[in-house]
Amino acid sequence: MRIIPAIDIIEGKCVRLSKGDYNTKIIYNENPLEVAKSFEAHGIEYLHLVDLDGAKSSKIVNYKILEQIATQTKLKIDFGGGLKADSDLKIAFESGANQITGGSIAVKNRAIFEKWISEYGSNKIILGADANNEKVAVSGWLEDSDEDLVPFIQDYQNKGIEYVICTDIAKDGMLEGPSFDLYAKILKEVNGIKLIASGGISTFDELPKLAELGCEGTIIGKAIYEGRISLKQLENYIIGL
């Protein structure tokens, strides 16, 4: 299972929110590049980079941070937040993103998201399926939609999606453990999907359980920043100790 630390950006700084609420913002580091380099130094190869300013403003904002990390580390970055138009995608890939994650756009403008899948390919486009009571949430989780989570993922799998990041909003940033039952349900009902678990990871022991369920990757945020999971533990996990 791939280990994918998260860096969330507001005003160029590395922050974390709880349940996607901007009022709960905690700044962990003024320098996201420094954070990314510390991940890389511990054998981590992947990074989930979220432009929270972009998610709010509906266009890419913090692409300079993406460019900085992409040019000064070898991390494979998936980038999300505010990608709404072809021009946003172009900027993200030109700034060094390896993959992009589309969440709200996949609900609100299916035509453009489906076009991205066919244009860029399923290895470049990740479906961000964020859930609140098994309904898909959009706009930085500020709105719920009427979309049921599992049929939504199945529908996009039929359109060619392979990678899905699923965050249970109730768990995100709460350090109360991930949604094992939800991920088990998705993996049972959607065959062959590469599911990346996100939200709620709080202890190292949860990682083997997610791997056992069949998750392809897991995104870890606050647990790293709060010292619940050390980078050394992740390094040992990656090298198989």
Image (cartoon, rainbow, N blue to C red):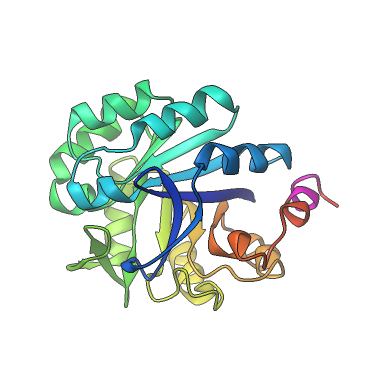
Q: Position of residue 163 (x, y in %)?
A: 43, 46
Quadrant of residue 233 within the rendered picture: bottom right
Compared with 97, 165 (above or below) is below
The residues colored magenta run 235-239
Left or right, residue 171 beside residue 85: right
Magenta region includes residue 59 = no
For the point 57% across and 51% down, the residue is: 217
For the point 33% across and 40% down, the residue is: 160
Q: Position of residue 237 (x, y in %)?
A: 76, 53
Compared with 152, 170 (above or below) is below
Instruction: From the image, give the main secondary structure of the stretch colored magenta.
Output: helix
For the point 74% across and 47% down, the residue is: 238
Foreground of the two, 168 or 27: 27
Left or right, residue 42 beside residue 118: right
Quadrant of residue 169 within the rendered picture: bottom left
Quadrant of residue 159 within the rendered picture: top left
Q: Would residue 161 be seen by someone viewing this image from the given angle?
A: yes
Q: Would residue 123 be seen by someone viewing this image from the given angle?
A: no
Looking at this view, name the residue that lies furthest to the front.
30
Q: Position of residue 118 (x, y in %)?
A: 27, 30
